[in-house]
Image (tube, rainbow, N blue to C red):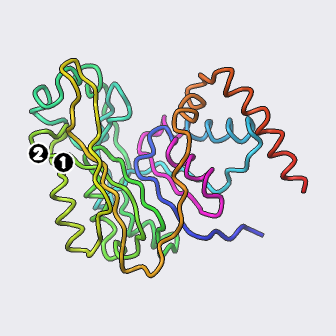
Amino acid sequence: MPKKFRGHIFDIGANNGVDGIGLAIKNKNHKVLAFEPNPYLCKLIRKLKKRLEKRINIDLSNYTIYNFAISDKNGYGSLNISINDKVSSLNKLSKNIDKSWPQYKEKVFKVIKKISVKKITLYDFMKRKKIHKIDYLHIDTQGHDLNVLKGLKYNIFNIAMGKTEAAITKKKSAYQNNHTVNDIKKFFKSKKLDIKKIIKIDHASENGIINNEADIYFFNKQFKELPIINRKYNERYLSRTFYCKNNLKDDVGDFFLYIFNSLKKLF
């Protein structure tokens, strides 16, 4: 008999899968649905999932990765794959990027490939899967987050809480047609969503720290009780495992974790 989950967590723009898999490990009673438009990364994420399941004897059947781009319209779009795949985007690079992101264009943002990807709205995906509510929505789509939110349509009122990203200003944006912190504020106000906190993201450069982006944490005060979501996962450990660069400390810790999980399954 399939397990009945307490709720759903969505990870939009999964990249290497670390955030979604971390959330799946820490929230076993939630189903984590992750979305990544880059098919190559999707294959690696599935390998990471299997590697972790074997390495620490854990069941990650509550995690599923989908090879879709999430947007405000269904159809197909062009994914600009950057030299650093973490910043790949459906949006083109800003014409002002040399000034706003000094030293970053060639080393990080440079587009090396373009591929056609399937786009779907969260509204249509939720309708297809008969999902009525999202307990936690994690969005990191490099300049496309507001489109993801708009694609929810009236399901935006069924989001309990989440995190999204935005440029500080249009001039500081890495992408064309990017949304800003103020754009997100206006959108949330129109949907009666509240912002819990805004944290500027630090990016190092030769000229010091660049603060061009911010993480925005939000919640829906219309919910009588917000779900409890554990977001304290070891991102660095998961990244090392993803790239097969685990150290001796990881190996020793995972050995004992494997034994612990094995014994837990027996009783």
Q: Is residue 219 left or right of residue 40?
A: left
Q: Is residue 52 left or right of residue 31?
A: right
**Residue at the top extreme?**
206
At x 17%, y 66%, the residue is 186
Q: Nearer the viewer, mark 1 or mark 2?
A: 2
User: 22 or 154: nearer the eye?
Assistant: 22
Q: Position of residue 258 (x, y in %)?
A: 79, 39
Q: Which is more N-terminal, label 2 or label 1?
A: 2
Q: Which mark is residue 201?
A: none
Looking at the rendered structure, the secondary structure element under dot 2 is loop
Give the crowd class for mark 2: few <14, some 14-19, many >=20 residues within 10 Å.
some
At x 58%, y 33%, the residue is 237
Looking at the rendered structure, the secondary structure element under dot 1 is loop
Identify residue for label 1: 178
Residue 7, image quadrant: bottom right
Q: How far is the residue under mark 1 from the one under mark 2?
A: 7 Å
Tell me where the magenta segment starts and ends, as one range: 18-43
Quadrant of the drawing holding the N terminus: bottom right
Q: Is residue 19 left or right of residue 265?
A: left
Magenta stretch holds residue 24: yes
User: 94 or 114: nearer the eye?
Assistant: 94
Placement of 241 over or under 139, stated as above or below: above
Q: Are marks 1 and 2 in contact (CB under 8 Å)?
A: yes
Identify residue for label 2: 170
